Each structure stands twice: as C-alpha cells, then as structure tokens.
Image (spheres, rainbow, N blue to C red):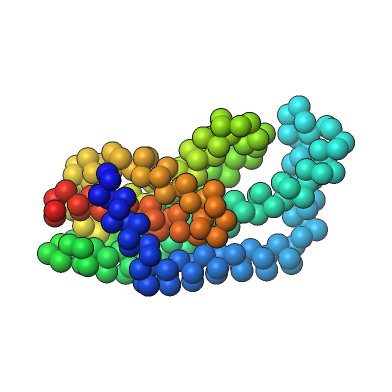
Amino acid sequence: MKNTVTKSLQDILSKDVISFVLKVGFGSILLWIILLWASWDLYAGLIATYIQKIPFVGSWEWFQSSGAFLTALILGYMLIIITISIFTSLYSEPLLIKLAKKHYPNISIVGSPNITTSVILSIKAGLIFLFLFLFTFPLIFIPILGQIWMLWLWSLLIKEPTAYDVAPLFIADKKKVKEKTKKSGIIAMIASLFNYVPVLNIFAPVFAQILFLHNILGEDNA
C-alpha cells in the first residue's frame, strides 16, 4: 500500500493529471455557481425548509437564522464534490490508460467500462451520499465522530464508481476483479481525505482512481 500511495502522489503532480483535474474541478465549480446564482431563492427556500425539519435543533430560532447560510454553503460544497466525482468517472479513461502505460508498459487494455453503467453507478453513489448526508447532518458537528463519519460518506461517493471505472480496463476476469477490489473501501477513504481541504478536494476522485490503478496493477507488474 505504501508503494501504491507513493506512486499515486507522484502521478497527481504530473502535468496531465493537474490539467485534467483543473478542467473537471473548476468546470464543476463554475456549473454550480451558475445554477445556484440562477435559482438562489429556490435553493435558499429548500434549505430553510430542510433546517426546520432537523431533529432537536431545527426549531431553534437562532439556528434557523444563523445556520441557514452555513448549511447552504456546506450543501453547495457537497454538490460540487458529487459533480466532480461524476465528471471524473465519465472522462478519466484516457488519463488512466496513459498513466498505466507510463508505469506498466507491458500492460494490455482488455476492455472499457460501459458508459451507461458508469453514469448510473456515479449517480446512485451521489444520491446515497446526499441522502445519508442530509439525514445525518448534525453528526458532522460532533468532534472526531463527525469527521470520521464524513470521511466514510465521502468514501461511499467514490468507492463503487472507482472500482468499476478502473478494473475493466485491465482485468477481464470477474473473479480477479472481485479479489482486486477488496481494498477499494480503504482506497476511497484515503483519497477522500482531500475533501477536507478546499481546492485540493478536486483531486479526490481522480486520486482514488490512480490509487486503485496502482493497487490492481502494482503487484502483478512490479
């Protein structure tokens, strides 16, 4: 795992990865700035309604007034992260192949993930993440527990899509894919640490894919 992390950190500093991340990351940020700017009243109204329904604290007047803006910012941040994950899933294949060829020249490309399945998995992961986040929102303010819970939620967002997007490129045997994806949860949590740092969070999904790439190819092509 140490070698996997080291190689992955080196890769995310490469020109190709940085260029990809900037396009996907800032494209997602710009998209949500435009969408929220155009529909801010509706968005703010939904946030206000949501806050009132939060157990225990939703009825507190001070929380309704001061918490609305903070909640709007946090939810907006989560929507950007979800969008970055989806766009990364859709457009990262050429980058992954290029990185694989760089580190493992003899590796063969045996397939390609189905674009429809990839989109479905990404959207499903995003909806599950959003559902759990909204229903457990107060938990994130509990020291330590909240941070661990948030890290786990972020890992759910990229775990399944990452495994699906990367593995079919290099492994045709489904049994081997299942074996190689056993560490996908740990990999997703490591990559999700980037989400705690604004701006660097745009690296999280592609970092997860690169980690997974080295994890499944490193041992067999050392």
* Relative image position of residue 101 (x, y in whole percent): 21, 67
Nearest the viewer among 179 and 26 is: 26
* Relative image position of residue 57 (x, y in whole percent): 77, 31
Report the side of 28 relative to 106 (left or right). Answer: right
- The answer to whether residue 42 shows anywhere in this view is yes
Report the side of 110 relative to 60 (left or right). Answer: left
Q: How many tags in the picture?
A: 0
Dividing the image into 4 quarters, which one contains the N terminus? top left
Q: Tell which residue pokes out farthest to the top in this image.
A: 56
Q: Residue at x 78, y 53 (%)?
A: 44
Q: Residue at x 64, y 40 (%)?
A: 134
* Relative image position of residue 213 (x, y in whole percent): 28, 55
* Relative image position of residue 22 (x, y in whole percent): 49, 69
- The answer to whether residue 123 shows anywhere in this view is no
Task: Give the vertical position of 89 relative to 121 (above or below).
Answer: below
Nearest the viewer among 216 and 9 is: 9
Q: Residue at x 19, y 42 (%)?
A: 175
Q: Residue at x 62, y 54 (%)?
A: 77
Report the side of 70 relative to 83 (left or right). Answer: right
